[in-house]
Image (cartoon, rainbow, N blue to C red):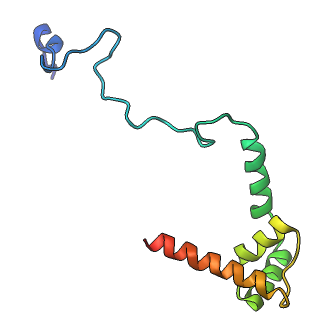
């Protein structure tokens, strides 16, 4: 069934209280601006860093993952914490690295407190 709408109904403004400036399409305000995934600054090396992050975290062999999990459990760390130490500082933590391990655990506790707040 075809419904006929009169021309006067279709062009009638919604409200005369809100003056619309020239060049405005009458749509909603753009309060939630789109933010690109690299932020408001320039792109810079964003995609190089993204590729490096993917290569570091997504492609380790099963043997390396098992080794890191075993070492992390022995030290009381998570796989992510142990792997970050290797990637950031270039060294495998040992049982003798008590001070650094305690620092990592304190940072974990601080993150947990911040997420609960």
Q: Which residue is at 72% across, 43% downward? A: 46
Please state, as top left, top right, bottom left or bottom right, where the C terminus lies in the image.
Answer: bottom left
Q: Nearer the viewer, residue 65 or 77?
A: 77
Quadrant hosting residue 33: top left
Q: Quadrant of the N terminus?
A: top left
Q: Residue 27 sits in which quadrant?
A: top left
In this rendered view, identify the residue nearer to me: 76 or 25.
76
Residue furthest to the right in view is: 91
The image shows residue 69 at horizontal and vertical percentages of 76, 82
> Can residue 61 be seen?
yes
For the point 77% across and 91% down, which residue is it? 74
Q: Is residue 26 above or below residue 93?
A: above
Instruction: Judge left or right: residue 100 versus residue 30.
Output: right
Along the viewing direction, whichever of 10 and 78 lies nearer the viewer: 78
Residue farthest along the front direction in this orientation = 99
Q: Is residue 98 above or below residue 16?
A: below
Is residue 49 depicted above or below 76 in this figure?
A: above
Residue 69 in sight here: no
Q: On the image, which quarter does residue 93 sit in? A: bottom right
Judging depth in this view, the residue of 38 and 51 nearest the camera is 38
Q: Is residue 32 left or right of residue 88?
A: left
Q: Position of residue 48 (x, y in %)?
A: 78, 44
Residue at 80% of width from left, 86% of height from top? 71
Q: Position of residue 23 (x, y in %)?
A: 35, 10
Residue 103, position as x, y percentages in the image: 70, 79
Instruction: Name the side, left or right, on which 57 lies relative to 41.
Output: right
Count the numbered circles shown. 0
Residue occupying the point 58% across, 79% down: 109
């Amino acid at each position: 069934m075809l419904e006929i709408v009169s021309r006067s109904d279709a062009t009638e403004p919604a409200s005369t209280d809100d003056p619309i400036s020239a060049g405005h399409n009458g749509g909603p305000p753009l309060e939630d601006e789109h933010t690109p995934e690299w932020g408001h600054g320039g792109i810079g090396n964003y995609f190089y860093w993204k590729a490096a992050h993917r290569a570091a975290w997504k492609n380790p062999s099963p043997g390396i993952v098992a080794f890191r999990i075993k070492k992390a459990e022995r030290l009381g760390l998570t796989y992510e914490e142990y792997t970050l130490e290797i990637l950031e500082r270039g060294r495998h933590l040992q049982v003798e690295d008590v001070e650094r391990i305690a620092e990592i655990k304190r940072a974990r506790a601080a993150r947990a407190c911040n997420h609960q707040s």
